[in-house]
Amino acid sequence: MASERTEASARPLPATTLPGVRHIIAVASGKGGVGKSTVAVNLACALAQGGDRVGLLDADIYGPSAPLMLGSAAAPQPGEDSKIRPVEQHGLRVISMGFFLNDKTPVIWRGPMAMSATKQFLRGVDWGELDYLVVDLPPGTGDIALTLAQEVPLSGGVVVTTPQDVALADVRRGVAMLEQVRAPVVGVVENMSGFVCSRCATRDEIFGERSREDLERLLGAPVLAEVSLVEEVCRLGDAGTPIVIVQPEHPVSRIFATLAERVRSALDGATAAAEAEPVTIREDAAGALLYVAWSDGHASEYPLVYLRGWCPCAECQGHEGRRRFVHAADAALASWEPVGRYAICFAWRDGHRTGIYSYAYLRALCACPRCKPEGPDAGGPGPAEGIGAAR
């Protein structure tokens, strides 16, 4: 029979979704200067032109560009329930740090302040009902991208690159970051894939040239669009009138319309094929067991000493590259909490709380009789190899 504490600790994981928002799309890049914001703005506009309700969150706190590219200097107004009402422009609902700054005000913030602003833009804004919320992330794989993934489930991510080798090396990190936080990688947009002269319409491959097949092989993700470097795109973006809005029949606008359709299709497929997630976690303190019910109907049981021994943090595992079992003096569980929609953080009564167990890792650790009929074998190396592949 379960103890009183066991029943009290049985609870479903809290929902992390944004109320009313159907899909959240992250637009990322491994480095700056690849036209990520141009892609994010025109993708959002293309989705809206297709009849969808679309929001744009400019999460590039240090270098916001959405107000300029959308031609709006409006100030967001108070909304319901002490939330901020987003600015509406070109059929989009938009929030950006740029709305709260003038042209000469730098954002000299440390990471925690930028992370706090990101949370505020997600949950402190009255987004209303949206089909898509496009999030323009800052370059790289730092605090803001991680905060986004921890706060809300990402329906998918689009990574922007240019043809140079240095950009391709960085975009692999962007793809890996999205995979690490369980955001389906929708695909890659190769921006500035060639320069098209506005006078003679000749095309020059000024950044080099690769076939789509080569790009997909190098990046490990599908190429959704190849966007040429065209003068009108830059000029209209600087004027606050995205090319998709003012020249919908332009070849580049048609490319963005195709990109929007591919993103729609990919997100519908990704939703149907989502990996199993924990639905409920319950502790049996008397039996020193943890039970996890998964969204695919499976139920896992974990001896606490086993779960604690396979803690994935660097302090427990070191840097040797192979999983090892760590014997802890106290394997009593204090609490647990979700990390975004991709991991669980367990806090132990001995004060240890740095282990973040991804869903894939936690599922690979399943010690139930069905998954490990020979028993968990907590002192041995049994699951090390398989778990290493699931990291």
Image (tube, helix red, strand yellow):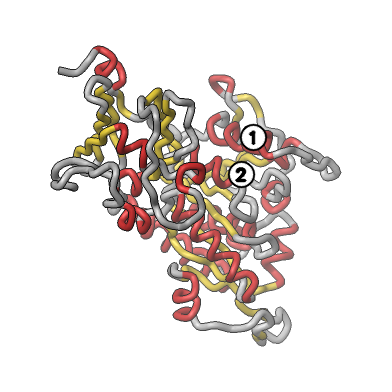
Look at the numbered disc 1 and give the secondary structure of its residue.
helix
Q: Amino acid at mark 2?
A: Asp
Who's the residue at 54% across and 82% down the image? Answer: 210
Which numbered circle lies on residue 311? none
Q: Is residue 369 visible?
A: yes
Q: Position of residue 44 (x, y in %)?
A: 54, 53
Between circles 2 and 1, the one closer to the viewer is: 2
Disc 1: CA contacts within 10 A as few (<14), some (14-19) or many (>=20)? some
Q: Is residue 16 visible?
A: no
Q: Position of residue 23 (x, y in %)?
A: 42, 46
Q: Is residue 334 left or right of residue 113?
A: left
Who's the residue at 50% across and 66% down the image? Answer: 188
Who's the residue at 24% across and 32% down the image? Answer: 291
Q: Which residue is mark 2?
A: 143
Which image quadrant is residue 245 in? Answer: bottom right
Which image quadrant is residue 116 in? Answer: top right
Q: Amino acid at mark 1?
A: Ala
Q: Position of residue 218 (x, y in %)?
A: 49, 75
Q: Which residue is mark 1?
A: 117
Q: Residue furthest right?
A: 104
Q: Is residue 87 left or right of residue 178?
A: right
Look at the numbered disc 2 and give the secondary structure of its residue.
helix
Q: Position of residue 118 (x, y in %)?
A: 60, 37
Above or below: residue 188 compared with residue 350: below
Disc 2: CA contacts within 10 A as few (<14), some (14-19) or many (>=20)? some
- Looking at this view, is 60 or 374 the one in front? 374
Instruction: Give the mark nearest the N terminus, 2 or 1.
Output: 1
- Looking at this view, is 367 or 294 the one in front? 367
- Looking at this view, is 110 or 215 the one in front? 110
Quadrant the N terminus occupies: top left
